[in-house]
Image: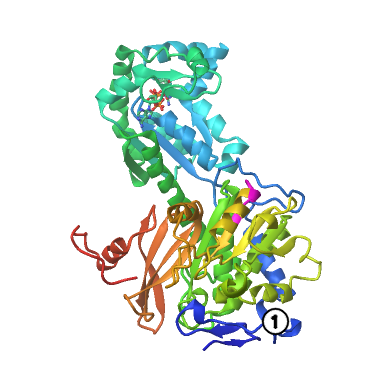
Amino acid sequence: MASLSLSSAHFSSTSSSSRSSISTSSLSPSSTSLPLLQSPIRRRYRSLRRRLSFSVIPRRTSRSFSTSNSQIRCSINEPLKVMISGAPASGKGTQCELIVHKFGLVHISTGDLLRAEVSSGTDIGKRAKEFMNSGSLVPDEIVIAMVAGRLSREDAKEHGWLLDGFPRSFAQAQSLDKLNVKPDIFILLDVPDEILIDRCVGRRLDPVTGKIYHIKNYPPESDEIKARLVTRPDDTEEKVKARLQIYKQNSEAIISAYSDVMVKIDANRPKEVVFEETQTLLSQIQLKRMIKTDKASPVQDKWRGIPTRLNNIPHSRDIRAYFYEDVLQATIRSIKDGNTRLRVDINIPELNPEMDVYRIGTLMELVQALALSFADDGKRVKVCVQGSMGEGALAGMPLQLAGTRKILEYMDWGDDETLGTFVKLGAIGGKEVDEEDDMFILVAPQNAVGNCIIDDLQAMTTAAGKRPVVLINPRLKDLPASSGIMQTMGREQRLEYALTFDNCYVFRLLYYLGTQYPIMGALRMSYPYRYELYKRVNEENGKEKYVLLATYAERPTPEQIDDAFSGKSRDQSKKASGIW
Ligand code: AP5
């Protein structure tokens, strides 16, 4: 039996969403003003975001999303400082291209800088040329001065740097130490010698784009590009062997200088696979730094990692605000990164329709916090709740959503006529998309027994084109009725379509199989970082904490979660049993 307390917008359902219901007839504007959403609190919320100074969305001056920029930038992060090293042709330049594209670091390649000097015919170029052509190292004083000058420029300080091919001698490493230049990470690309020679001999460069090709491994995309490719003078087999020899003589001293931050990567794999590993390492540094910054920042000094007392219902304002902010930042990062089909899955007890403490008000608050934040930055946001999906006896709409449109209308959207201008309410469907809309937030779109929302959703995303569509807690699996009303035709296509939405935020609590108490741990993913698995640990003073157990590039399977909790390596034949 469901009941609704209007003042707290709290309604309980015993076990499933279908049993949750809400009477809209008794709603009145005054009774539905949710306490957390009063203007002063919203202002506090906005100011909190401002003080965190995420610079990812422009202010009201611009309404367009940049979908082409796929770089990760987040101003609360100190810029990354990365060194990449490895033998000739280990793939440093190739990885740098990908890193720069993703992380926006300033690429400082001593090889490229020297080649530019040579082709411009400068004094430095004239001196460097003969060393380079013979495969030997250019004298330290030339290279050190060049790098020191480049590192001191504003762009490198602001965006971070990626040092490629430097230091290459102990003296060069010492010079950096004197300048107090230390990397966050020293990536060493490891490739067997015989592969290196083939890579060098087959390497071709595009003088127009600077892109690196290989005649076999990475051939050019067109005949036009192929015709203009050039070969480096030091890429003959004989010279490569000499370069390799010199590299080996120096590498040990350099590696020992950075052993505390060194990570060796097997670079004898396709460049995409190597990059996946590189990218994960860099994202982890950013994540750790973000957590540290949050802890140190006055506005986040109460930051506790995963919030505790999640079994206490209703959740405190702090806990709700934590999750709204967490979801918001992940969504902002994902949109800024060019993603347009996003999905948020947040399953704290108050947002889990399977639990008897589900609160529709919390879901509405979350949606409002997101919508207002984007609206505050000049975007025209359409918040959409699906309508009834049939006629007569077939009319259907998930009960969980019944009345939510009304709640949204009655909520306090501020006194500056935000609702109706920067935030509009709508349903789900192709016709709901107006030219002026910049983005769409869809409230828990879901299939109802006998009805499928996917067609409407698909029509909507087609009409939205490159504009972001964010699904909050969607449930897009088929729910066939016992009478089989839900069509089974096209099921695969529907599931495939549902998968086109990328998770930008995931949070769920973990329990022993079949129970909802006690909380065993939590799984969190906040774009673009990895899935983090936490274990809840009771402390002596009656408190609790969440301890990071493992991280994963992909959502971990129940088996992987089981393994992490039991600390065992998996026997393939073993089935998952414990945590869900
Ligand atoms: P530099 O240009 O830095 O040359 P290097 O260190 O010898 O490295 P390379 O540029 O040859 O290779 P790379 O690791 O970047 O590989 P790439 O991605 O191109 O330096 C040139 C010269 O300048 C030096 O010899 C020296 O004289 C001088 N110099 C530079 N720095 C100096 C310093 N600090 N001090 C003194 N002198 C200095 O890939 C190679 C090929 O493999 C490509 O064809 C690519 O398509 C292919 N490939 C890349 N990744 C993969 C993969 N995963 N699988 C298959 N193929 C791949």
| Corner quadrant of residue 460 | bottom right
Tell which quarter ligand 1 is in.
Answer: top left
In the image, 174: left or right of 51?
A: left
Q: Position of residue 281 (x, y in %)?
A: 40, 47
Give the colouring mode of the picture.
Answer: rainbow
In the foreground, 431 or 474: 431
**Disc 1 beta carbon < 8 A from ligand 1?**
no
Residue drawn at (43%, 44%) of the image:
279
Residue 75 visible in the snapshot: no
Looking at the image, the residue that sits furthest to the right is 416
Q: Is residue 172 left or right of residue 149?
A: left
User: What residue do we see at 49% from left, 71% from top?
Assistant: 449
The local secondary structure at tag 1 comes to: helix
Is residue 496 rendered magenta in the image?
Answer: no
Q: From the top left corner, tell me how far across and down residue 15 is, in percent.
A: 45, 82
In percent of width and height, residue 465 lies at 63, 46
**Image coordinates for residue 551, horizontal then vertical, percent:** 37, 57
Q: Is residue 465 magenta?
A: yes
Name the residue tied to disc 1. Answer: 32
Kindly indicate the quadrant of the structure image that contains residue 277.
top left
Q: Which residues are magenta?
A: 463-469
Q: Is residue 175 above or below residue 570?
A: above
Q: Residues within 10 Å of mark 1 (few under 14, many from 20)?
A: many
Q: Residue at x 42, y 22 (%)?
A: 219
